[in-house]
Image: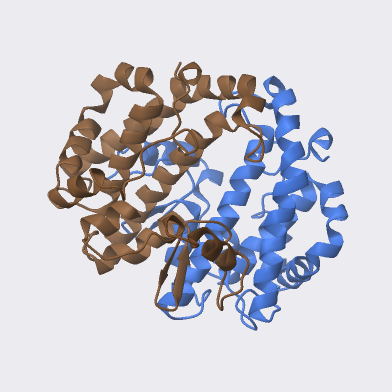
Chain colours: A blue, B brown
Amino acid sequence: VRLALEEARAPYRDVTRTKSGMASMMRMLHGVKEGLCPFAPPFLRHGTLVVAQTANILLYLAPRHGLVPSGNAALLAAHQLQLTVADLVAEVHDTHHPVGTSLYYEDQRPEAKRNARSFTKERVPKYVGYFERVLEHGGGPHVFGRRLSYVDLSLFQVMSGLAYAFPRTMKRLARSTRRLRALRARVEERPAVAAYLSSERRLPFNPDGIFRYYPELDI
Amino acid sequence: VRLALEEARAPYRDVTRTKSGMASMMRMLHGVKEGLCPFAPPFLRHGTLVVAQTANILLYLAPRHGLVPSGNAALLAAHQLQLTVADLVAEVHDTHHPVGTSLYYEDQRPEAKRNARSFTKERVPKYVGYFERVLEHGGGPHVFGRRLSYVDLSLFQVMSGLAYAFPRTMKRLARSTRRLRALRARVEERPAVAAYLSSERRLPFNPDGIFRYYPELDI
């Protein structure tokens, strides 16, 4: 979501990173405000509209900022890919939390290792193979051809996260991720994205995030 | 998706249940046809358009069949709820497959039991509590008030699945799921839904589906 806003140079406020921002977020989750409450972060407030669920937020933002080709077919195609990215990200989360979100990683290490074995061996190759075919199909360099869309930004984020969390696995898959790696490099060089990545607004990957580097899970 | 089509009395063909339907589905997944290939089933073909990802298919169908209030805000709100339903369904799947989709349940029983403990104790109450608040907020009996939407159909499906897979857990939560149970009963009685449920088109819950009844996981 931040990448989309940054690429569009849309002004936004990352509320939980401001003073009293966490309290403000909790108020929204507990429904003090009017309207439909989100189940969980992230959510976007734009005027009186509150939109939750990452893919839904991007569905809302993208047409407003020229980050998806026009027309309903492209909107649905982009969203389909974004939801597939979301599935992959959920599986990344499950590698370190296969038993339960409420437990620490340290309390589910054997299960995590078993999950990560099948994730690195089967699931990552299946997902990256799929997205490579999508890039090939579109003619490149982006998902929808010459013009960037928010799906490219999401693929950049996922490829960056996978390279951080599973460096050995991704090195092993280097030859079968040529298009994705070229896309990642291309997105990284976009002026607005580059400015964002080198700013304090960019949250570095870290051991509390979804993408975590645990060498024992990079099998 | 089937519930939405049935409630709308829209003609459809459930291709994988026809002769040579599985082969037809595999051809689509492997990209013999033109256009964006789905990563996985389910997907809908309507003319030349192919839409994958359950929530995305419903996003496409609902406005065409009067299954969501008009306006962009309602479309986003409904989709947000559908994506939250999808998250819950994914967590249901993880109870019996916490280690890997490619392994049998029998090869991940201890991990499944640990996952199911936190799922039944923490996650189900959290999700149903959220959806109860949504129903309360809308004034009932449906998510958007007096008129049925596809989100109500999805909540019907989830409540039916949870009652099948986790009967003890759901009995324990009976008092805190009053609105959801009333909604389930109401949806079940709708003429088109009732006709569908008693037909062969309805796939009964079964040990190969997402909702599975393993007594040892109903903690």
Count of marks, rendered view: 0
Q: Which residue lies furthest to the front in this view?
A: B19
Regarding residue A204, the answer to whether it shows in the image is: no
Query: What residue appears at the point 49 percent right and 64 percent down from the top-left corner?
Result: A79
Considering only vertical position in the picture, is A203 above or below A75? above
Query: What residue appears at the point 31 percent right and 34 percent down from the top-left corner?
Result: B160
Of A8 and B159, which appears nearest the observer? B159
Considering only vertical position in the picture, is B60 above or below A44? below
Of B19 and A197, which appears nearest the observer? B19
Residue B116 image point, x, y percent: 52, 23
With A198 as the anchor, is A171 left or right in this view?
Answer: right
Q: In which quarter of the image is residue B128?
A: top left
Q: Quadrant of residue B120?
A: top left
Which quarter shows the N terminus of chain B? bottom left
Q: In which quarter of the image is residue B51?
A: bottom left
Residue B63 image point, x, y percent: 27, 66
Considering only vertical position in the picture, is B56 above or below B113? below
